[in-house]
Amino acid sequence: MQDFGYLDLKTNEYHSLEHGQYISTFKTYNDRLAILDDEHHFYFYEFQDDELVPLEVTIMEEINPMHIFFDPEGHLIIYIDEEDDTDHSRVGVIYP
């Protein structure tokens, strides 16, 4: 299993972050971190008070995000594609 986290340069401590077997992709914007793992589970963090804090984002259980990225204004874009039904692809946006 892959370990993914961050090193706190002030305390020299390493902090592991929750994810599946391995990280498929991750994106950052300012103090925010978005992660997709190998099973398309989505994790969203924000740096607050010197630590990464998980943010609650509800995505319907049957939805599998395929791609994530931040636009230039910091909106998180989540692209959802149904593997067997590409006519029903969707895009979601999370505002900063």
Image (spheres, rainbow, N blue to C red):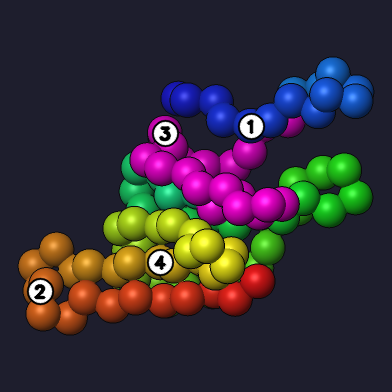
Residue holding disc 2 = 85
| CB contact under 8 Å: marks 4 and 3 | no
Q: Quadrant of residue 4?
A: top right
CA gap, disc 4 and disc 3: 19 Å
Amino acid at pointer 1: Gly
Point 19% across, 69% down: residue: 82
Mark positioned earlier in the residue sequence (4 or 1): 1
CA gap, disc 3 and disc 1: 12 Å
Residue holding disc 3 = 22
Q: Residue furthest top?
A: 12
Mark positioned earlier in the residue sequence (4 or 3): 3
Residue holding disc 1 = 5
CA gap, disc 4 and disc 2: 17 Å
Quadrant showing the N terminus? top left
Nearer the viewer's eye, disc 4 or disc 3?
4
Nearer the viewer's eye, disc 3 or disc 1?
1
Point 65% across, 71% down: residue: 96
Q: Residue furthest front?
A: 72
Identify the mark at residue 70; answer none if there is no mark. Answer: none
Residue 57, given in percent of the width and then of the height, sits at 58, 70
Residue 50, given in percent of the width and then of the height, sits at 87, 43
Label 1: few (<14), some (14–19) or many (≥20) C-alpha neighbours in 10 Å? few
Q: Could you tell whether 8 is left or right of 29 in the image?
A: right
Badge 3 element:
loop
Label 2: few (<14), some (14–19) or many (≥20) C-alpha neighbours in 10 Å? few
Amino acid at pointer 2: Asp
What is the number of callouts on the image?
A: 4
